[in-house]
Image (cartoon, rainbow, N blue to C red):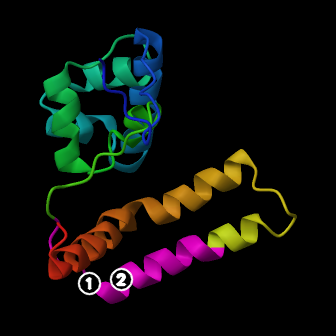
């Protein structure tokens, strides 16, 4: 008898087009923040390869895509999020708690502003995510630390 996990929903399968699109969203964000040359350098390829993947003309080899995590630990969030997953570091360095708290409060403030009219539209969602994304690893590290203190990790 086949065992099926009834707690976790099934993983959605990606088409090549879906994978290219998810990766391109992350690359668009990274090239906006760092420029295609720096992204290519960190990935281990040239700028043209990054531009082509960003523009959905091609995709990156798995090793190049994973190398992006050295530049930004959220580099693959859009791709993995499209199938219901999120990648988090196994361990995170202790963060400046005041910096983390301030960043999370900025995200909460942006979320409150987005709800002023009762509807959070896609551009507001993007702004909220932009504020929260850099602080999620530190927040997750705090939760993981608490789990370790409890002996649950």
At 34% from the left and 41% from the top, the residue drawn is 35
From the image, which quarter does the N terminus lie in?
Answer: top left
From the image, which quarter does the C terminus lie in?
Answer: bottom left
SS for callout 2: helix
At 35% from the left and 11% from the top, the residue drawn is 58
Which residue is farthest bottom?
98
Magenta range: 92-109
Q: Is residue 122 above or below residue 120?
A: above
Residue 12 lies left or right of residue 116; in this view the side is left
Q: Which residue is mark 2?
A: 99
Q: Position of residue 98 (x, y in %)?
A: 35, 89
Residue 43 lies left or right of residue 140; in this view the side is left
Pointer 1 with pointer 2, Cβ within 8 A: yes
At 24% from the left and 70% from the top, the residue drawn is 144
Q: Which residue is mark 1?
A: 96
**Quadrant location of residue 40?**
top left
Q: Position of residue 85 (x, y in %)?
A: 38, 40
Q: Position of residue 13 (x, y in %)?
A: 42, 18
**Quadrant location of residue 50?**
top left
Mark 1 surroundings within 10 Å by alpha-carbon count, few (fewer than 14), some (14 through 19), many (20 or more): few
Q: Which mark is residue 120?
A: none
Q: Position of residue 150 (x, y in %)?
A: 20, 80
Q: Is residue 19 above or below residue 36?
A: above
On whether residue 99 falls in the magenta region, the answer is yes
SS for callout 1: loop
On whether residue 95 falls in the magenta region, the answer is yes
At 26% from the left and 20% from the top, the residue drawn is 60
């Amino acid at each position: 008898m086949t065992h099926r996990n009834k707690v976790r929903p099934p993983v959605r399968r990606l088409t090549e087009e879906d994978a290219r699109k998810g990766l391109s969203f992350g690359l668009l964000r990274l090239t906006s923040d760092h420029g295609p040359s720096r992204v290519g350098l960190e990935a281990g390829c040239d700028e043209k390869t990054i531009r082509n993947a960003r523009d959905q003309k091609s995709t990156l080899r798995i090793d190049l895509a994973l190398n992006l995590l050295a530049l930004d630990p959220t580099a693959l969030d859009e791709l993995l999020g499209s199938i219901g997953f999120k990648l988090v570091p196994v361990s995170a360095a202790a963060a400046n708690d005041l910096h983390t708290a301030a960043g999370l409060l900025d995200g909460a403030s942006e979320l409150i502003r987005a709800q002023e009219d009762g509807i959070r539209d896609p551009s507001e969602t993007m702004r909220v995510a932009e504020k929260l994304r850099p602080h999620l690893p530190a927040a997750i590290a705090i939760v993981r630390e608490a789990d370790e203190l409890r002996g649950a990790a």
